Structures are given as structure tokens and as C-alpha cells.
Image (cartoon, helix red, strand yellow):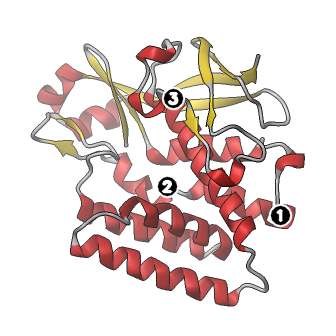
Amino acid sequence: MIVRERNQELILIQQDHHAAISGDIVKQWKKDYFLGDDLRSSVEFAAYQHDCGWKEFDKQPFLNDKEAIPYSFFDFPILPKIVLYKHGIDVVQQVDSYAALLCSEHYKRFLLNHTSLEAQEFVTAENTRQQSIIATLNEFNKRLFNFHYGLIQFSDNLSLYLCLNEPGIAMNAGHSFFKDGIPMNQALHEFCDEHLQLHWKNENTVVLDDFPFEQPFDVVIKQKAIPKADLSAKGLIASYEEATFEEWNVTITTL
């Protein structure tokens, strides 16, 4: 779950809905900037599905009893998080092995430096999974894979920028993750700078200084607003299930 806090309410965005924005972002990547066109559908699928393991959990969010707000993907306990990571990669692998390879790398890197035994076992298991997948491919090009993984990282970060920030917020008041812009994987530097600079022009428009897309495009942020007073009165799950989805349209464009 992505959690954004306001004075009197919480904005909750399901991880799978955030991933839908990531997929839309990759789908708009400029054709001339895409390496390995025969794998594009797999890269797009990985972006759309990279958080599918969270889908059922986010329908009934978990309360962080210490902070009295829902757990977000930042602070969700590590052991169930590992279960969700593995489940999501398994689901993707049933459909597209190369997409699963990308998702595996994405989640593996989150836990590379985590010291728990379970996290290190996850990293080891994903290394084994990756080698097994690579062995089944007709050809594996490491340079192409790094580029495709860079796209997954970029689309994830740009979608998070949209979801973690209040629409229209000034750049210097936005989430600390993006104080220097959107970080770009080294494999994408041939097309973009080290950090992609961007800002909210208004509540429905985000402007990118560098524009690696075919044309301006729209994405939809799907969210629920939960009054904080409802959490104690009704409980988190009831409050969340009773709330209706709001859809916020945002245009991504250039100067």
C-alpha cells in the first residue's frame, strides 16, 4: 500500500494500481529509444505486473498499531513482505519468464543488504530462479537485460513520484525520495541524464525537462481517501472497504 497523509485523512493507493501507471509509462517509451524490440511486450508486462503479489493484501490493508496508520510498502514487516515478493514473481513467471526475470531482479535488489536470514535466503533463491530462467532462453543479452531493468526501475520511480506527492506540490516540498529528480539507471544514460528533472505545472499536469516518450500521455491515479476519525470508529478494513475509489487524471508532458 502507498500511504499519503493529510491533516484529517489518509490517501491510500494500492500497489497494483501504482504498477498500472508504471506499465503505462513503459508503454509510452519512445520506440527509437527502446533496445531489444522483440522483448518489449515482456518488459511492459513486467512493469504492469511487478507488484501483483500485493493485490489481495491491499484490498484489506494492515494497520501499523504503533503509528496508528496503515502499513505502507516502506514499513511493512519484512517476513510477510518476502512472501508477497515471491508470490508475485511466481505469478508473473507462469505467464512470461523474461518478465519474471526482471521482477526477480527488481525485488532481489531491495533485499541484497538486508541482514535477516530470511532475506538472504530469498536473495539466494532468486539468484537460482534467475539462472534457471536464463538457461531456458534462446539467447540472453546482459546489456539488453540491464536496459530493460533500468526501464522497470524508472517507471516504478516515476509512478511513485506521482503517487507519493500531493498533486500540484512544489518541487522543494515534495517527497524526499525525489529531491534531486527521478534517478535514472546507468543503462538509460544514453537517452537521459543521471536524474530526470520534473515538476507539477498544476494539479493535473507534470512537466518533464527531458522527455523520452513518444508524446504527452495521461495516467490515472486510483486512490481512496480515509478520514482519520473513521480508523478508530470503524477500524481500518471496514473504513477502507466502505470508501469509494477516486480517479485523478494526470498528463505527463514536456516543456
Q: Residue furthest right?
A: 32
Please indicate whether residue 90 sits to the left or right of residue 233 in the image.
right
Q: Residues within 10 Å of mark 2 (few under 14, many from 20)?
A: many
Please indicate whether residue 41 sits to the left or right of residue 133 in the image.
right
Amino acid under label 1?
Gly
Q: Nearer the viewer, mark 2 or mark 3?
A: 3
Q: Residues within 10 Å of mark 1 (few under 14, many from 20)?
A: some
Which residue is depicted at the point 84% across and 42% down?
A: 30
Q: Nearer the viewer, residue 147 or 104?
A: 147
The residue wearing badge 1 is 36
Q: CA gap, disc 1 to disc 2?
A: 24 Å
The residue wearing badge 3 is 180
Q: Nearer the viewer, mark 3 or mark 1?
A: 3
What secondary structure is marked by label 1? loop
Instruction: Tell whether label 3 touches label 2 (CB within 8 Å).
Output: no
Q: Earlier in the sequence, mark 2 or mark 3?
A: 2
Q: Nearer the viewer, mark 1 or mark 2?
A: 1
Q: Nearer the viewer, residue 226 or 99?
A: 99
Instruction: Tell whether label 1 touches label 3 (CB within 8 Å).
Output: no
Query: Residue 177, percent across and down?
Result: 43, 34
Q: Relative to 227, is 148 above or below? A: below
